Image (spheres, rainbow, N blue to C red):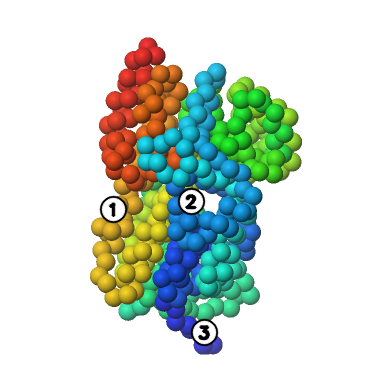
Amino acid sequence: MPTVEMERRQVVVIGAGPSGAIAAALLKRQGHDVLIIERQHFPRFSIGESLLAHCLDFVEEAGMLEAVNAAGFQMKNGAAFAWGERYSAFDFGDTFSQGKPTTFQVQRADFDKLLADQAALQGVEIRYGEAIVSADFERALPQLTAQREDGSQYRVEADFVLDASGYGRVLPRLLDLEAPSNFPVRQAVFTHVEDRIVHPGFDRQKILVTTHPEHRDIWFWTIPFSNGRCSVGVVADQTHFAGRLGNLDDCLRGFIAETPSLSGVLKDAVWDTPARTIGGYSANVKTLHGPGFALLGNAAEFLDPVFSSGVTIAMRSASMAAGLLSRQLNGEAVDWQDEFAAPLKRGVDTFRAYVEGWYAGTFQDVIFHADSSPDIRRMISSILAGYAWDPRNPFVSEAKRRLRVLSEICAGDQG
């Protein structure tokens, strides 16, 4: 039996997406040896294209902000919501948390490659086209087996492993950490178009989230890019797609045709790219960490695309994990539950409350309420900008209760 190559590294990061690139760069900046192993080759397609303002805090922390600012991505200054004749816009420059006032809408193939390239420029080694096929955490030090595209394998022994594999969920699969999500099974059908939008009410500096006129649990994203194109998608419970998935292009355009406010915005669009679909994407795990590993971003938990929280949660987890791991590698005792899992979960649970409220209609009632107080709108705008970990914001610290009370007030006013 041939001998399998073995190497020793300090930290191995699985995946070169945003959370992997940010975590690796932060660790490298602290003087640690970091290897990223990425199954795909970049650039590669991904959704999650409308960044929240909080993302740029971590991009800046990792020394990548100058490159991102110079890349020519579409500026984003907030989020807009439409339902029939109703329209409500939130400005990231007017938030309770007073975070970054703008961010970007990005084609993820370009954005993710930029972040990975920036990590490499800082000295992080990235190996593309290699997959982790087994993981052994029963040893004194974690050991991963990687397989190259030619089928050859090698092993890497590390002090610690960060799983930033996104939807690939490498360690949850290999270590039996998968747990069911409590969200209904939803599906998204999406594409990119040459948008040719001339609608006077459309703001290219905001994501547009449109609610279906009859089914409030069906919604659309419209994310404009700087090159005259935009990402368009519909999200709904799988039951709404019954009989529609035979032709994905007809499916997406059919839902849009049922929604006059959106079909008017996209009336001149050139549908030049075949639609894609992803379903059952909500996911959870039994634990976010264990001896020798931690899970970042979508590798751990993915809620729903409605508020574009995925990349923010991924980057936040990367920053937190890198800080803790650097301390641990320097000999300090750290508590991954109290210093990583629990505080990360607080923000995720804030997003979860608003995602649940969105599909229940209660948060939509708040968003579309005609006479919301400016202070409350600033608090909600903070969450939409990604600042879901700010305990000073009452709509973060008491998310479920505040949303319930406010939605009852809004419903009463409309009644």
Given residues 128 and 19, the one toward you in this image is 19
Q: Is residue 20 left or right of residue 321?
A: right
The image quarter in which residue 400 lies: top left
Given residues 94 and 135, the one toward you in this image is 94
Circle 2: residue type: Leu
Q: Which residue is mark 1?
A: 342
In the rendered image, which quarter contains the C terminus? top left
Q: Nearer the viewer, mark 2 or mark 1?
A: 2
Sequence-wise, the earlier of marks 2 and 1 is 2
The image quarter in which residue 149 lies: bottom right
Whether residue 356 is situated above or below residue 368 in the rendered picture? below
The residue shown at (54%, 78%) is 153
The residue shown at (55%, 20%) is 84
Q: Is residue 279 left or right of residue 109?
A: left
Is residue 208 visible from the viewing direction of this image? Answer: yes
Rendering coords of residue 289 (x, y %):
33, 62
Whether residue 325 is situated above or below residue 367 in the rendered picture? below
| Label disc, if present, on residue 56 of the rendered structure | 2
Circle 3: residue type: Glu
The residue shown at (57%, 54%) is 68
Sequence-wise, the earlier of marks 2 and 3 is 3
SS state under label 2: helix
Q: Nearer the viewer, mark 2 or mark 3?
A: 2
Rendering coords of residue 353 (x, y %):
35, 37
Distance (Cα) linking label 2 and label 1: 23 Å
Circle 1: residue type: Ala
